Image (tube, rainbow, N blue to C red):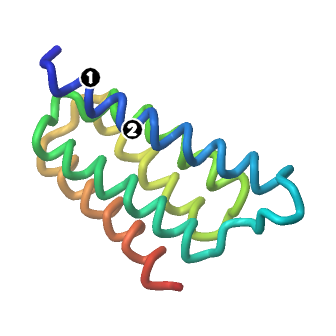
Amino acid sequence: MSKYSSGISTKLAGIAMLLLASTILAACGSPSAPPPTDSQKSDVAKKSVDDFVAAAKKKPKEAAQNLTILMESLDAYANEFEGPYIELRDAAKELLSLYQSSAAKDKIDAQLEVLQQKANSLASAN
């Protein structure tokens, strides 16, 4: 494992923890802490996907591991906020399946594009 791979994994794990913590805090926080707006939720999800896609293109051998970490956040978002977050999570699940089956690079690249489009549509919907 290179010195950069642990940094990407750590960054994605940090993002996953931040998303999970913000979801928990929003659900049981004090009355003075308003829940995240739709725009804030979509911005965080989009940034997470953007970071993953960029890392996956630079280091494809580490992408499946990084996607597994990202899936934790996407699952939480899909369960909590539903709607387009379910589509985003499902696109990521399909990509993970392609990585696990050692699919051809063109299929993986196409699904990376689908994932990116789903993330972009979250941000443009707000």
Q: CA distance from mark 1 to mark 2?
A: 10 Å
Tag on residue 6?
A: 1
- 43 left or right of 36 in image: left
Closer to us: 61 or 44: 44
- In depth, the one of 63 and 27 nearer the eye is 27
Q: Indicate the position of residue 64 as horizontal and vertical percent values.
A: 31, 31
* Residue located at (16% from left, 27% from top): 4
User: Residue 125: which numbered mark, if any?
Assistant: none
Badge 1: residue crowd in 10 Å (few <14, some 14–19, many ≥20):
few
- Residue 17 x, y percent position in the rendering: 55, 37
Q: How many marks?
A: 2
Q: Determine whether label 1 and label 2 are within 8 Å by CB.
A: no
44 relative position to 108: left or right:
right
**Residue occupying image coordinates x 21% and y 58%:** 110
Instruction: Report which residue position mark 2 lands on.
Output: 12
**Residue at left offset 13%, top offset 18%:** 2
Other residues around mark 2 within 10 Å, as few (<14) / some (14–19) / many (≥20): many
Identify the amino acid type marked 2: Leu
Task: Report the amino acid beneath label 1.
Answer: Ser
Residue appearing at x 29%, y 51% in the figure: 51
Q: Secondary structure at mark 1?
A: helix
**In the rendered view, does 3 fall on the left or right side of 24?**
left
Sequence order check, earlier mark of 1 and 2: 1
Image quadrant in which you'd find residue 36: bottom right
Above/below status of 32 relative to 90: below
User: Which corner quadrant holds the N terminus?
Assistant: top left
Q: Residue 94 at x, y = what percent?
A: 41, 46
Q: Quadrant of residue 98?
A: top left
Helix, strand or loop under label 2:
helix
Between residue 16 and residue 58, name the one nearer to us: 16
Q: Is residue 3 above or below residue 106?
A: above
